[in-house]
Image: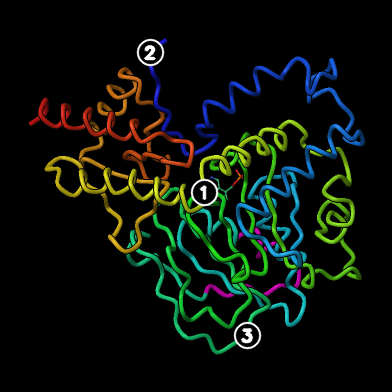
Amino acid sequence: MAQIYNFSAGPAVLPVSVVHQVQSELVSYKNSGMSIMEISHRSSLYTDMEAEAEENLRKLMRIPAEYDVLFLQGGGTLQFAMVPLNLAKGNNQVGYIDSGHWAQRAIEEAQLVPKIKTDVVASAASTNYTTLPEVPKLKKQYDYIHLTLNNTIEGTMYRKLPENLKHQLLVGDMSSNIMAQRYNVEDFGLIYAGAQKNIGPAGMTVVIVKHELLDDKLELPAMLSYVKQAAKHSALNTPPVFAIYVAGLVFKWLLEQGGVEEMQKRNEKKAELLYNYLDSSSLFNAPVTKDARSLTNIPFVTGNAELDQRFIADAQESGLVNLKGHRSVGGMRASLYNAFPFEGVQKLIEFMERFEQSVG
Ligand code: PMP
């Protein structure tokens, strides 16, 4: 089969060696005569695997002992509700940064949680989300401030946290850039990320939460309660065994490759190559301002919707697949997660140069 480069925003490309390893041990996991999908989540085969995955994630992200690490279900979307259900307690006032589509979904879900008052403390609506919102000095102390570290659709990303949020408790949605660059876990009260972009298959969500924020007197249904999930090591019910297993293999792969610093270096190289080309092209254009540009999701357009369609179709024929932008913004988007290879970016640029000449 011809080489395919998968630019999907998620579910997304996995390291080739990990997919091969899954294949090789699929029929008999650790010589048990059963696949990982067929074993009990109460068996040591499972609990050892889960413990190793957690330990490796702790190493990769330098997660301090006072944080719980949970592997939950329900995607990033369930976290939009779980975060306010669990963390909005003091004055029931929570703050949100409106940096784009997924931040807005988070706001909408928080507004559905009874008795909670949601303030949007900053928004990038006026630039159509091609910049990051300017966060003003905040007069109130909020239960937490929610921010989306990487805006998957719009292609903006916080390289550094906004100064004016320093004294607030931060909740970070890292669904599309977890471990793509180094963040300091201690700057956050809680971090969450759906696995299907930069970690593994869909079906598992990583939640990293400072234990002291959890209130064991809070009456919530068990599946919605961080404290109850933490007490049962994420196995309060049957966990997503296969997704956790593949994520564990990706964590090992990341450590072997040199960890988050090495990923950040590679991601910066890949992104720089593509942005430099986009900035010099007379056909293609990257709409996001330079200081807000994402390392992992790079939207671009020709300015002509029909030409965009043709580009996407022609690219697909050449093995450059899933370049279509999100339906809400159109155009193209190249997602360059940790497992996406450098040569895929080179191939994309060569193709774009040829396309540019053919229409010029
Ligand atoms: N947050 C961000 C930043 C996302 O990109 C997405 C999905 N694309 C979500 C949340 C929602 O994730 P899920 O589909 O896992 O619920």
- Quarter the C terminus occupies: top left
Q: Is residue 49 left or right of residue 123?
A: right
Q: Residue at x 42, y 10 (%)?
A: 1
Query: Which residue was labeled with disc 3?
Result: 141
Query: Which residue was labeled with disc 2?
Result: 2
Query: Which residue was labeled with disc 1?
Result: 176
Marks 2 and 1, the one that precedes in the sequence? 2
Query: Badge 1 local density, few (<14 within 10 Å), some, or many (20+)?
Result: many
Q: Which amino acid type is marked by label 3?
A: Gln
Q: Is residue 119 magenta?
A: yes
Q: Which amino acid type is marked by label 1?
A: Ser
Helix, strand or loop status at disc 2:
loop
Pick whichever, 1 or 293, lies toward us: 1
Helix, strand or loop status at disc 3:
loop
Marks 1 and 3, the one that precedes in the sequence? 3
Q: List x then y, in percent, for residue 281.
A: 15, 43
Ligand 1 is within 8 Å of the C-beta of the residue at disc 1? yes
Relative height, residue 76 to residue 302 (above, below): below
Helix, strand or loop status at disc 1:
loop
Of tags 1 and 3, the one toward the viewer is 1
Pick whichever, 150 or 211, lies toward us: 211
Image: magenta residue range: 108-120
Q: Residue at x 63, y 59 (%)?
A: 62
State yes or no: discs 2 and 3 in contact (Cβ < 8 Å). no
Q: List x then y, in percent, for residue 295.
A: 39, 51
Of tags 2 and 3, the one toward the viewer is 2
Q: Is residue 345 left or right of residue 57?
A: left
